[in-house]
Amino acid sequence: MAKVQAWFAMLSVIIAGNILRSKSGEPLVPALFIFGDSLADAGNNNNLTTLAKANYLPYGRAFPGSVPTGRFSNGYNSMDFLCFKLGLPIIPIYADPNTKGVNLLRGVNYASGASGIENYSGRSFGELIPLEDQVNNFMNTKQEIIDELGEEGASKLISKAVFSIITGNNDWLNTYLFPFSPLRVLYTVDQFRDHLINKLVLQIQKLYSNGARYFVVAGLGALGCLPSQLNRYNSNGSCIDFLNDMAQNYNEALRVRVQDLNNQLPNSTFLFNNLYTPLYEAFHNPAAYGFIYVNQACCGIGKFGGFLICVPEFPVCSEEEDYLFWDAYHTTDKMFKQMVDLMWENGPPYSYPISGKEAVYRTM
C-alpha cells in the first residue's frame, strides 16, 4: 500500500508540474515547423505567380483585423489552432523576409498552396513550393538556428520541436485525377499510393537525419465530399464514393507506414492524424458539429460553389458559422478548430496511436 501511495504521489507531482508549465506562459514545445499544402499555407504563395493564393478578401475576413494573410480560410487555419494548443505564437512563414534570427526560433511555416509530395503535382495552378523544396528550405533555417544558438542549442531545439506535415491532396485531386493525366496510365491507384508514400517517407527521413524527432503526419480528408468534387462529378449532393474509398485506402497505408517509423527511427515519435473521419462525420451529421450547410461552399460559384476557389467578385455567404466549407476545397475555420480539438484530445480514430496531447506530455 505504501508503494501504491508513493506512486500516486509521484504521479500527482508530475501532472501538477505539467499543468503549471502549460499555464506559466511557456510553450509545451519549443517550436513548430510546418510543411504542406493549402491546408497549412499562411502566405508563402502570396508573391508567386499562381491561382493558388488567398491574400485578398473575403479570405481572412474572420481573421483578427479582417486581414487576408494568405490562409485558405475565412480566419485561422489548422496550424494556427495547433499553435494555440502548444502555447506557441502563430508561426511565421518562410517567405517573410523578417523570418530570420530570433524570429525563427519558435518555428517556421514552409507550406505552399497547391503543392504536393511530387514536384510536378499541382502545377496547373502555377508556381508553388513542393514538399522537397520545403524540406530544403528547412535546411537553410537550421543553419540560421545554428548561427543564433550554436550547434548544441540548435540540436536541442530541433530535437524537441514538432514537425507537422499535411500534404498529398493535390497529388491526387489536381494531378493523378486531373483530366487527361498520363499518371493513370503509368500507375494503378495502389501503385501511385505506394509511390507517394515512399517519396513522403524519404522527406521525413531527411528531416530526421537533420535532428527532427517529433512528427505529426496527416492523411487525406474525405475528398469525395469537397464542393469542388461534387461539382466536378455532377453529384446530387452526396459524397463521391470512389474518391472517399481512394482516400481511405491511401490513409490506411500511410498510417501503417507512419506507425512503423516509430520503431524504425530511434528516439522518434510519430503521430498519424486522420483528417478523413471528422470531415466525413461533419458532412453526414452536421448538427453534431454545429453546421447547417455541408455541400455548399460559403464562397464560390457553380454547382455547390465548387468552381475554382473564392475570388473577390464571387458571392459569399453572410453566416459562415453555418457552413462546413468556406470554398471549393477548404473548410471554414470553425471546422479547422474542431478537427484539431479532436486530434488533440483523442486517440483513434482521430489520432494514432495516441492523442496529440498525450504525445506532447510524454515528451515533457
Image (cartoon, helix red, strand yellow):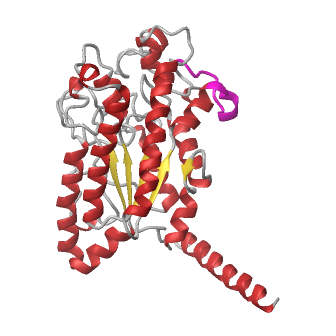
Residue 139 horizontal/vertical position (percent): 19, 60
Q: Who's the residue at 43% across and 16% down the image?
A: 306
Q: Range of the magenta residues?
A: 284-297
Q: Is residue 280 left or right of residue 171?
A: right
Q: Is residue 244 left or right of residue 2?
A: left
- 330 is higher (above) or lower (below) than 81: above
Q: Quadrant of residue 141?
A: bottom left
Q: Is residue 189 left or right of residue 357?
A: left
Residue 109 horizontal/vertical position (percent): 31, 51
Quadrant of the drawing holding the N terminus: bottom right
Q: Is residue 219 left or right of residue 43?
A: right
Residue 70 horizontal/vertical position (percent): 32, 38
Does residue 340 appear anywhere in the picture?
A: yes
Number of numbered callouts drawn: 0
Foreground of the two, 364 or 180:
180
Residue extending furthest toward the bottom: 2
Does residue 89 appear anywhere in the picture?
A: no
Foreground of the two, 193 or 244:
193
Residue extending furthest toward the right: 1
Residue 114 horizontal/vertical position (percent): 29, 32
Foreground of the two, 5 or 312:
5
- 77 is higher (above) or lower (below) than 136: above
Q: Who's the residue at 44% across and 41% down the image?
A: 253
Give yes or no for residue 59 being in the magenta stretch: no
- 149 is higher (above) or lower (below) than 281: below
Q: Who's the residue at 61% across and 72% down the image?
A: 19
Foreground of the two, 39 or 322:
39
Q: Who's the residue at 52% across and 19% down the image?
A: 241
Q: Magenta-highlighted stretch: main secondary structure?
A: loop
